[in-house]
Image (cartoon, rainbow, N blue to C red):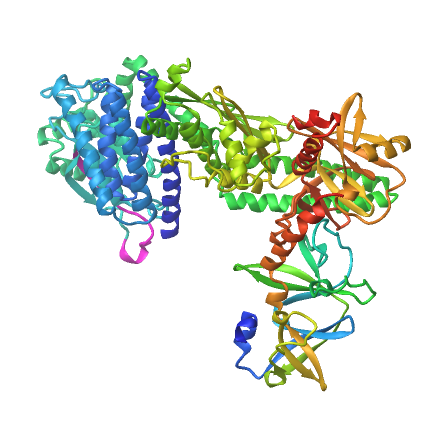
Amino acid sequence: MSTSLDQALQTYIAEARELLEEMEAALLRLESAPDDAETLGAIFRAAHTIKGSAGLFGLDPIVSFTHIVEDILQRLRDGNLAVTAQLIALLLECGDHMQQLIEVVAVQGGQLDATAHAHECGLRERLYSYQQAVTEEACMPVVHAPEPTIEVCDEQHVSSELWHISLRFGPQVLRNGMDPLSFLRYLNSIGSIQRISTLSDSMPPMDSMDAESCYLGFEIELQSDAERATIAETFDFVRDDCQIHILPPHGKIAEYIEMLQQLPEDFSRLGELLVSSGALTPQELERGLAAQENPSGNQPQQLLGEILLEQRVVQPAVVQAALDKQSQLQEQRSREQRYVRVQADKLDELINLVGELVIAGAGASLLAQNCQDEALQEATSVVSGLVEEIRDGALRLRMVPIGDTFNRFQRVVRDVSQELGKDIELHISGAETELDKSVVEKIGDPLMHLLRNAMDHGIELPEVRQAAGKPSKGNLHLNAYHDSGSIVIEISDDGRGLDRQRILQKARERDLISSTATPTDAELYNLIFEAGFSTASAITSLSGRGVGMDVVKRNITALRGSVELDSQPGLGTRVRIRLPLTLAIIDGFLVGISQASYVVPLNMVQECVELSADDRRATRERGYLNLRGEVLPLIFLREHFNIDGSPGRRENVVVVRCAEHKAGLVVDELLGEFQTVIKPLGKLFSTLRGISGSTILGNGAVALILDVPALVLQITRQASHAAQQPAALSICAR
Amino acid sequence: MGALLTRETDLRQSQEEAQYLTFMLSGEMFAIGILGIKEILEYGQLTSVPMMPAFVRGVINLRGAVVPVIDLSARFGRHNAEVTRRSCIVIIEADSDGNTQDIGLMVDSVSAVLEIARSEIEPPPAFGAKIRADFISGMAKVNGAFVIVLNVDQVLSVDEMTLLSEASGPALATPS
């Protein structure tokens, strides 16, 4: 049982984190659209769920703090409080604190340290000030649902001012990891339990009792201002296997009677119990019993339940509304249930297996091709088709939209811009662009760094911007889109741009370029990704220490990605990150050089051209090919990789494209498409450039995967250096 | 000297004898402790990796894992080993920064597994050996002849080999 409880706690922690993120996003939305009731509702629900579930686990520090936050949110929702920037800032801080509480209390099972505690006290005080402000202003009583009617002296209604809750826990409750006591504890957090009677009637004799079953029932008198729904929600987790009756203060006697009838225990005994606990007066009980025996005179046999039914039929509209609401709730619930939580490592395991399946499948189809058995070939081709679909499906499981990562930065931008005294707005587009989860996890930090850099160095102070004739509000854009098998993430600002002269001067100081060379803008700007390169004259707390940009680049390179930078003085800077969609399996194009096979990622291949005998000599001298009037720089892989042996009888050019660069890879043979399971080469090969990994072919041999972006970059760099002299190659050097 | 041995052999240090695999390389006999050895393969389908130093022979497919193969002869600074009918790849579990990595060691031929008493192993000579002194863990007397017991951790040090390939890589990478 303890393990399932532990699992439930883990689920709670994961959910709470997600809810807090949602809450934060919603709060930020609220800042721009303060009247959006839906957003407010979302924030309230998030806080409410966090509190409710925390109550179930007995995480009291979370419950008590969140309760106050929830209260404020409730007031906001009721319109008793106005949304102000101050209040949102406070609620954001509260969100942070709840995060901390969850980390400390739920994850580590510890207590807050003194500073955090002091922080909480501060927050509480500020929250109280809002609470009080409201109670003074809003003397008008909040109109609740029609249930708590105020006609006390009516014969139909009981005089008790307390909620009556009748609980019969099902035998499975303990096994399902629920502790009945935690529900009672939670009830105390939304009201106060005035009286409680424990019923152990269903407890079997000692020898037949199952220690893991729950036999308890409770009759509770609760004093609370909460609505029925709030009280009912307490029991959300056990509703299915328990009998729960909640009767409002001054409820109808008939309802009490109906409840008593439905309960398993002896009717009169329970009646007495209720009388003794003060829920009913003796007179009320008598009246109810009499009514049951002789409900309306001429129909003595009619059951009380039916009477109630008739009563309900009188107000069909009310019933219909209730039913509609119920079905809505169910629909919402089923929508939520369409998601299945799966542990990430299970998914990774699956993808590894699919990878092995792809390799084994390739081996099988290779063998089938060597046999003359057509039926076998047919069968294997069907299998490989299916394997391909499974592969795509499995990889899609791990694809997540980048929007969640992007949205996290709203808060960062908000906080940092306030800290810097700048007015900056973050615009997000392409949030639905999907990429592999493992990539998403690793891209957060580099993005954060680039954003901070843009805010700190890129975007100017409002006065400076106005002086430069720009609107005082700075704009940051985060954009993502798919392009030829990679995902491109763009971070652009409309700030001052990079200072070409300063970078050039710094680069010469640091001997990164010779004092006579005149590098292109692109080359120069990309120098800021070199280690220890910072042009910021003043070091701020955010950036400017020169550590960071090289780390950004290293992290991105480790993901087999690339980063480039473009800047217009006075107009802004744009950083473009290009990442592979997945780190596991890709479609490859197999090429051969001598005996060795190499894989080119298929989505970078544009076309293949055969190099005619005439062309061969000429291109070898020139180093480029005239492709329909376009200059295509060539990489002679045999020479580039120092592969022994003479060139094959014929050579082919594989035209690849990476970003806006095109290049031709000269190879011997074209071997066709191949599903490539990427196997990392290990640390020993970490310094290798131009090869990004390896894969296993159908015949068991290892083939190397070409790192096309690195090769293309290398060739365009060479070309741009060669461009000092004549050459039409400068086109490729941008 | 204990530090030079693998952890597994440390455990056995108290015992009198330890087992060693002996193999031939350019006519000389070498030995390595048997505990780090996972398996011995016939030299087969190997994919060479371009732009790596000569001692990185290439990579092989070991039941779905890609494993680098080190040419021991070239690692000792000699010429690359010739592939013969008796060439073998010894798969060794090497330790690098707490991570274990399988590395293949290409040798001319594998001889035998011998039990050598600790008393029969002498410390490495300070000078005069044909290979780097830090590669030698000791000199074992087998049938009256000396066999060099290799310090596998040092010979297959991933960190050192990575540094070496970094140094040699760019030189090879710039095409003429």
Left or right: where A437 falls relative to A323: right
Q: Between A728 and A237, which is closer to the camera in this rendering?
A: A728
- Residue A541 location in percent, x, y? 36, 37
A253 sits to left or right of A25? left
Image location of residue A594, percent across then percent down: 83, 46
Quarter of the N terminus of chain B within the rendering: bottom right
Q: Quadrant of residue A16?
A: top left
> Residue A261 sits in which quadrant?
top left
Task: Give me the residue at 67% from left, 40% from top.
Answer: A707
Residue pictured at 40% horizontal, 23% vertical: A460
Does the magenta run of residues contain A206?
yes
Kindly tell me whether residue A56 is visible in this rendering: yes
| Quadrant in which the C terminus of chain B is drawn | top right
In magenta, the rendered stretch is A205-222
Q: Is residue B127 left or right of residue B78?
A: left
Q: Give the image location of residue A31, x and y in percent.
A: 32, 21
Please tell me which residue lies in front, A566 or A128. A566
- Closest to the observer, A553 or A30: A553
Q: Nearer the viewer, residue A490 or A164?
A: A490
Observer able to see residue A439: no
Q: Is residue B156 above or below residue A513?
A: below
Whether residue A146 appears in magenta in the rendering, the answer is no
x%, y% of residue A525? Answer: 55, 30
Quarter-of-image position of residue B19: bottom right
For the point 79% across and 24% down, which residue is it? A627
Seen in the picture, residue A726 relative to B98 is either above or below; the reply is: above
> Is A263 left, or right, of A619 in this rendering?
left
